Image: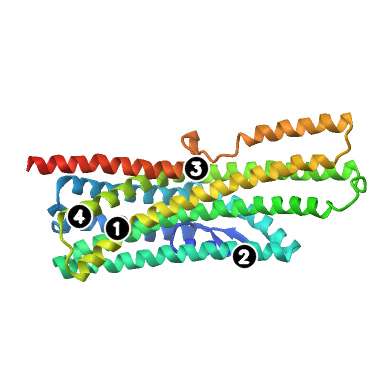
Amino acid sequence: MKHLYFYYLLGVMNIRYDKRKDLFTSSKLSTALKLVFHLIVPNVVLLTISIIGKTGILLTIPSVHMVVFAMRIVWTMLTMNITMLLNYLFTSKNQMALLNECLTCLRDAQTASVDESIAVNSSFRRSKIVLGIFLLHYTNYEINQYTYVLLYDEKWPELTFYILFYFLEMVTVVNALYYAAVLDIVHRTVQLDRDRLANCLQQNAKNDPFELDDPYWWRTIEHFYQRVLTINRRKRDYKRAFQLQLIMIALNTFIASFAIFYVNLNSMLLYAHNNVLEKYKRVTECLGFFPQLGALLLICYHAYKLENEQQSLMQLIMQTQSKLTKCTANLKRGDIFNSRIIILQSQLKISPYNMLNIDLEYFFGIVAAIVTYLVVLLQFRIFENSRE
């Protein structure tokens, strides 16, 4: 879980891993400094440039184009400010408690088994690679802003504005990656429990069915049922810490993604791209949707994997009951456990404020909605052209 330190450096969270205490901690001083440097200063600079800067390239293009792009800027800034304030001031303690609980669970697993330690570390290594890819994309995006100076003689106020804005857009996307990373950590704790129970059943598959008595299997069932309850509580803690942030990220992904699609499609239809710089600029900006949808996809994917792991663990618990002797007492007690598990299966979805279910179905619904709004906006463009 030390990979979360990268999010701390980027200003997404005010919680850092303390090696001496072997815990996630935060301090009032670091929170105050992050508020100043990651929220107050960027907002003041953008507002100042907006007031003193000259009319830039944004206002020389068609009106629908301008409104869509302005909507992207406004909503991205709103999302970044709200999510960061929530991370710093309102849900920091909930996040820290959740991360420390998961840290304890993973630490115990790594101590108990070398194989589990390798699996967990390889998973978090993939998280680092994903974060690196996103940062490389935005580095290229920032370099691309200099093409406006070469092609359109853009002045320093507008150049500074867009460089800073795209940096803050990167921070907004990294916020979503952070929420996906925490969800992945919760998923890993469930996977460890499922693997332990599966290994237990596999190791005892070759034994005589009556070699291990009913009390042993009931203790096993009770233990892993308690683990299911712990996982459900951990998911509630995740929702309590991130539900408003998830709503904001979902809305921002929808607005920013369809704005990027529309602005670039409109630009390709309006302007010729003859030289290498113009082609490089357009290709880079067309890829702007990649981090937006990619970050939301990771959140939905990890939520989907978490749900599947929980279902698999519950099925294994029910399968473990086949090891019991067929007597009336065991059957009645087994029915009670099965009814509890069936009730828990209806609570597997991550649903912020019960407004939406975070899963792959929701992600594909967002993509379909983006396509729908693109068609609507293109019809407005045709209407504008016909009036001209």
Horizontal and vertical percent position of residue 239: 54, 42
User: Which disc, if any, is residue 286?
Assistant: 1
Crowd rating for badge 4 (residues with CA inside 10 Å; few <14, some 14–19, many 20+): some
* Res. 173 visible in picture: yes
Classify the position of the N terminus by image quarter.
bottom right
Image point (78%, 30%), residue name: 335
Image vertical order of residue 42 relative to residue 211, above or below: below
* Residue, disc 4: 267
Of the image marks 4 and 3, the number of the one nearer the N terminus: 4
Compared with residue 125, is residue 200 higher up or lower down, i.e. above or below?
Answer: above
Q: Nearer the viewer, mark 1 or mark 2?
A: 1
Measured Cα–Cα span from mark 1 to mark 3: 26 Å
Give whichever of 386, 126 is nearer the camera.
Answer: 386
**Quarter holding residue 276:** bottom left
Residue located at (33% from left, 45% from top): 255
* Residue 221 on image: x %, y %: 79, 42
Callout 4–callout 2 Cβ contact below 8 Å: no
Q: CA distance from mark 1 to mark 2?
A: 34 Å
**Circle 2 residues within 10 Å: few <14, some 14–19, many ≥20:** some
